[in-house]
Structure formats: structure tokens, C-alpha cells
Amino acid sequence: MTTVRPAEPVLEAKGLKASYGPIQVIHGIDFVVNQGEVVVILGANGAGKTTTLRAISGMIDTGGSVKLNGEEIVGKNSADVVRRGVAHVPQGRGTFPELTVEENLRVGAYVAPKSANLEEDMQYWYDQYPVLYERREQTAGSLSGGEQQMLAVSRALMSHPKLLLLDEPSLGLAPLIVEGLFEQFAKLNKERGMTLLVVEQNAHLALGIANRGYVLESGEIAISGEASELMNNDAIRKAYLGV
Amino acid sequence: MQLFLQRVIDGLTNGSAYALVAVALVLIFKATTLINFAQGEQAMLGAFFALQLWMWGVPMWGAVIISMILSALLAALIERTLIRPFDPSDHLPLVIVTLGLFLGINALAGLIWRFDPWRFPELFPSGVAFSIGGANVTWYAVCTVLSAIVILGSLQLLLSRTKIGLAFRAVSSNLESSQLVGIRVGPTLQFGWALAAAVGTLGASIYVANPVLSIEPTVMLTVLVFAASAAALGGLDSLWGALAGGLGIGFIQSLLVQYAPFIPTELSLLTAVVVLLVVLFFRPAGFFGTAAVERV
């Protein structure tokens, strides 16, 4: 009998609760993101997907437990969570509109490890997205939605994170742009071994690059499983894949 | 013509000093969208520190530099104890805090130095540097305008080339995202308060070093109004806008005194306010500011 050695969890949430003021939105959920995995959180509007990511990043009142590489991060503020290796691309890109593209990348490296080479890292992203290089002196606010999302992802990775949180990266973008972004996410995962936790409305797209997924309903996990299982789950097909 | 030129020069000189206080207002406004009503009083207190140190025998520029540091430390303390505990998105309590500081610092200065005018040491060489068209340009005027430009240039460099400067601009641009790149917002804003106080103190010191002026606890009351008008004129979030606004306000004020003698001097402050209202009516974001655009 062979035993499968469980992969190292990068992130492990147990009984995670989150609230906005007096209103609890997440009612004690458990999930795991293992090293090198792409995990997707699906769910309808208002199910608590964004809130889950915000809870991990310490942006809202959170209870229960979230362990990052074994260390408890519930109760830590955002800056401290980021310093421990979580990069979070919020919904709506979260770039710095008044700063230039290059300054956005520089500020992204604010907590990069000392060993990181800022210029090399910037060059890497300019090679990935030549349009960012062309616009490096422009303010981020002048970029198109797709370019802003490229910048947001590049900026997040300038910090050399251990875990990348992506909140609805496809929101408001043209299908072709979205496809390119998801190819980049898959590449990040395969070539650089980046661990990703993705919140998405576009279930088909997200499950296409994911290993596993969770479906949130009203702040609780309704279904979880391998991406391929979820893809074939009738309830999910009806609710999120529109088939 | 000679009189006109003289008025322009006077206006630009005063305007440079307004600009420096305006820049202090702009620094804090950019980051927090809060107008610090105590900025002028903090600057006045700083200038009094400099005067006191000078009276104790410290060389005048040394006294100014030490007082800039003291003002920065005091501002950092104020930020930590009186500003940070309040919800940054709720402006009313914060406005009241800065108004309280305004009254408190003013009273404190009155208690220590009494409400009397004091002669401030001259920071620049005295006398006339050169004349144009019969109007005399004093060394004080030349140095004040140059100081304003050099200080703004240095600030610009600090904000664009240093890590803390970039962090400060990031916080000003997008608070939430700056937390998500690992910036500690509290200390970064504290840095902004300290920087603003240091610049304000330098501005106030240069302003009261004008040979025709003196320093007293109420000296910055009018300057604050002019500086706030200057900041609004330039656009409240633009450093160079603050300089342009300061020069503009100084210019208008100076010409009105000369050419609109029907406006009593008691009402000259009002002219700044009128200019402010007219500008805000037609250009709510000022001349160099960024208009707030929100997607709905």
C-alpha cells in the first residue's frame, strides 16, 4: 500500500469567520491551499468570496484561525500579512492611479526580500507585458482596464510572495484579455511554482487552471473538490457554468 | 510702472511664504483629504522655537534647522496621539481636533511669548540686490522666492526618489492598496505630518524674517487664510500648484492694496476669500489639482 504524502499547506483556514461591523458574512469555513496549487473559490454575488480574501489579508474583522505556513495570521494587520508573503490583487485592480507604471512596480517591491533585484524583476514583467514597458512613464490611471490588471498582477509579484490572492481578475475585461491573463496565471503556477488562491465568477475559466475548488454559498462552503469533479458537478454546471 | 513693479515684487515675496505654508497644507491634504487648520499655528510655534534658540545664542540658521526638527517631532507626536486614534474617514471629529490644536497652540505661544511683536533675526542679507524699472528688489525678496523654489524642488525629489517618499505618495493615491503592498499606513502618514510641520516652520521663519514684519502669536492667522486660498487656487493636491497659488494670491493681494484703495485694509483678508470662492466656483479642483473622478 502506498501512502500519498500530503502536500505542505501554505494556507490553512479553520472556522474562519468574518464580519463587516455587526454583520457576519463568513460563518466559520475551512479550506486549505497547498504549496504549488491553484485553488479557486466560486460563488454567486454576495456569497462572501471577496470577504474571504479580505479576511486572509487582515483587512476586516476576522475570527477563527488562518495559518500561513503554520503561523497564525488572524488578528494581524494587512501590512504584517503582506510581509509574511501574501500578495493580494483586490477587486477593481487596486493600482495607484496617480503613480506611474514604474512607480507602481517599485512600490510593489516595498516588502520584497533583500535578495530580490528590483531592476531585474521589473525587467521580467516588462518582458511579459511589453505594453507596460511602453507606458512605464504614464500614470497607472491612464491605462486601460486590461493593462491595469496586468500591472496589478505584476506589482503583486514584485514582492516575491509565497501566495497570490486574486480577486475576480476577469471582472470588466474583454474575453481575449481575460484569456491572456489566465494563461499568465497558469504559467506562473507551472513555471514559477506560484501558489494561487483565485476568486472568480467565471467558473469555467477558473476551473480550467485550478487543481481544486470550493463553492461558497451565503458565507458557508457548499461544495468542494477537485477541479475536474466540480466541472462535472450538475449543481455547479447549472448554477455557474450556464449549461 | 515703478510702483506697479514694486507691488508685483512684494506680492511675489509674500506669495512665496504663503506657498510654503500652502505646501504644508497640501502634503497632509493629499494623503488624508484633511485640512489641518493648526498648520499655521504649528509653523508659528516652530518660528518661535527658532527665535528662542537664537536668543539663547544659537546661530540663526542653526536655530531654524533645530526648530524644524522640533516641529517635526511635535507634529509626529500630535499625529500619533490626537489624529490616528480617530476614524480617518469621518472628517468632522478630525476637523474639530485640528481647530482645537489651533486654539491650544495659539494660547500656549501667547502664554510663553505674550501677545507682543518680537523682532525676528534676519535670515538673508539685508539691503537691495538690484533694481528693475526703478523698483528695488531686496535680497530678502530674492532669497525668499529662491528658497520657495529650492524647498519645493527638494520636496519633489524626496517624494519621488526615496522609499518613504514613494510610500507616502502610494498612501495618498490608494490607501487600501498601500496596505496590500505592505506599507504601514500610520507611520507613513506620521512622516507626512512631520514633513509638513518642518516645511511650515521654515516657511513661517522666512515669512517673519521679512525686515518689515515681526513675529507674534497671531502672525500666522492671516497667512493660513492666504495659504489655504493658495492651496485651493493651485489645486489642493499639487505641490507646484501650491507655489503657483501662493504667488497668485500674493500678487492679487498686493495689487488690490495698491489699486483698489476703496477696499479698507481691514477687509484685505476678505479679498483672498473672495478669490478662493470664485476659483472654487469655476474650477473646483483648482488650476493644477486632479478632479475627483469616480466610477459609478
Image (tube, coloured by chain):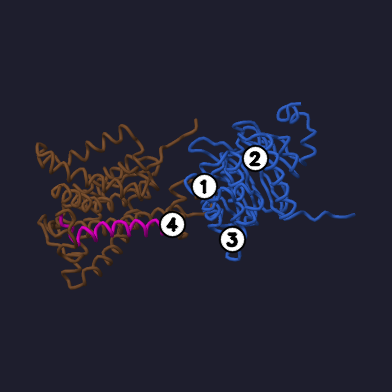
Chain colours: A blue, B brown
Q: What residue type is labelled 4?
A: Gly
Which residue is drawn at the image coordinates 17% and 46% (left, top)?
B254
Q: How far apart are marks 4 and 2 (CA)?
A: 33 Å
Percent x, y of residue A45 = 61, 31
CB-based contact (under 8 Å), mark 2 and mark 3: no
**Would you identify the image quadrant in which residue B108 lies?**
bottom left
Place of residue A180 in the rendered image (x, y in percent of width and height, measured from the top left): 69, 42
Residue wearing tag 4 = B165
User: Is B141 inside the magenta-drawn segment?
Assistant: yes
Helix, strand or loop at mark 3: helix
Question: What is the number of the mark on residue A138?
Answer: 1
Which chain letter matches label 1? A
Closer to us: mark 1 or mark 3? 1
Residue A35 placement: quadrant: bottom right
Q: What element carries label 2?
A: strand
| Percent coordinates x, y for residue B5 in the rendering | 18, 49
Q: Position of residue A196 (x, y in %)?
A: 68, 48
- Tell me whether circle 1 and circle 4 mark residues in contact (CB < 8 Å): no
Viewer-nearest of discs 2 and 3: 3
Residue type pointed to by label 2: Val
Q: B137 or A10: nearer the eye? A: B137
Q: Which chain carries label 4?
A: B
Disc nearer the start of the sequence (1/2): 1
Looking at the rendered structure, which numbered label has been put on residue B284?
none
Determine which residue is flagged by label 2: A199
Q: State the separation of the CA atoms marked 1 and 4.
A: 19 Å
The numbered disc on residue A119 is: 3
**Among the two numbered marks 1 and 3 on one chain, the one whose residue lies closer to the N terminus:** 3
Kind of residue at disc 1: Gln
Q: In the drawing, does residue A65 fall left or right of residue B164?
A: right
